Image: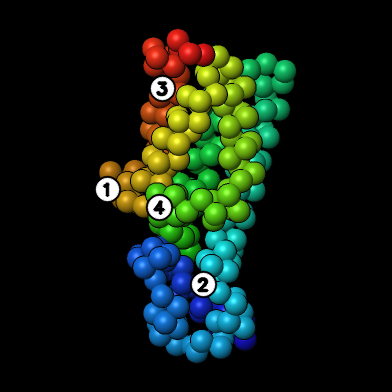
Amino acid sequence: MIETKSRILDTAERLFAERGFSATSLRRIIAEAGVNLAAVHYHFRSKQALLDAVMLRRLEPVNRERLAMLDAAEAAAGGGPLELEAVLAALIAPPLRLRQEPAYATFMKLMGRVLAEGDLGTMRKHFGIVVERFLGAVARALPDLPREELLWRAHFCVGCLAHTLLHKATEMFAATGEVTTESLVAFLAAGFRAAAPVNLRKHA
């Protein structure tokens, strides 16, 4: 029974990562996993529940590490301003590090696809706490950045991370997860610190 459930999860993870959630049918998952529809419904009830199970299986430790890193950054700051680079590293470093591990490689591609496709329901369910903590931390690091611009830049930040996870940038440039993290953090920090657009500043 456990073996069947794991086989379904592994197959769904691979197909969702390769083809996307909408383009992957339960029929395709069943065929490639070598199980019947009853087994999928018994363990997961629906395709959406199957995606949630795939996400939860891998994402829980990633988010736990992210929040632990953010806790450490906040503790180091004490009552002072947070270091922006430390906040960004807390968001980016855990998935990029795990991207190098065979057991997580396919899932990180899936995570990149979910973020890139803007699946808001799945994102809220599995990233909600992380997003709220991250937004609050960036606001503390950059208190003068207008809220509207903060949200736009956070959106661009997620897009950059999704693209990096989905398209194997670490392999393209022969870089480790640590090097990719440093480059991406430096790039995003510069973007977050850039002056707000003139029109936005007029209405702030």
User: Which one is earlier in the sequence, the residue at label 1 or at label 3?
Assistant: 1
Q: Are marks 2 and 3 in contact (CB under 8 Å)?
A: no
Depth check, mark 4 against mark 3: the one in front is 4
In which quadrant of the rendered view does residue 60 lie? bottom right
Q: Is residue 83 visible?
A: no
User: Which one is earlier in the sequence, the residue at label 1 or at label 2?
Assistant: 2
Is residue 50 placed above or below 192 in the rendered structure?
below
Return the x and y of residue 167 as percentages of the image width and height. 32, 51
Q: Which residue is mark 2?
A: 47
- The residue under the point 72% across, 18% down is 79
> Is disc 2 placed on a helix, strand or loop?
helix
Q: Are marks 4 and 3 in contact (CB under 8 Å)?
A: no
User: Which one is earlier in the sequence, the residue at label 2 or at label 3?
Assistant: 2
Q: CA distance from mark 2 to mark 3?
A: 40 Å
Depth check, mark 4 against mark 1: the one in front is 4
Residue 190 disc label: 3
- The residue under the point 50% across, 31% down is 151
Q: Amino acid at mark 4?
A: Glu
Residue 117 disc label: 4
Q: Which residue is mark 1?
A: 172
Return the x and y of residue 120 as percentages of the image width and height. 51, 50
Return the x and y of residue 100 as percentages of the image width and height. 43, 53
Q: Are marks 1 and 3 in contact (CB under 8 Å)?
A: no
Q: Amino acid at mark 2?
A: Lys
Question: Badge 4: how crowded within 10 Å, few (<14), some, or many (20+)?
Answer: few
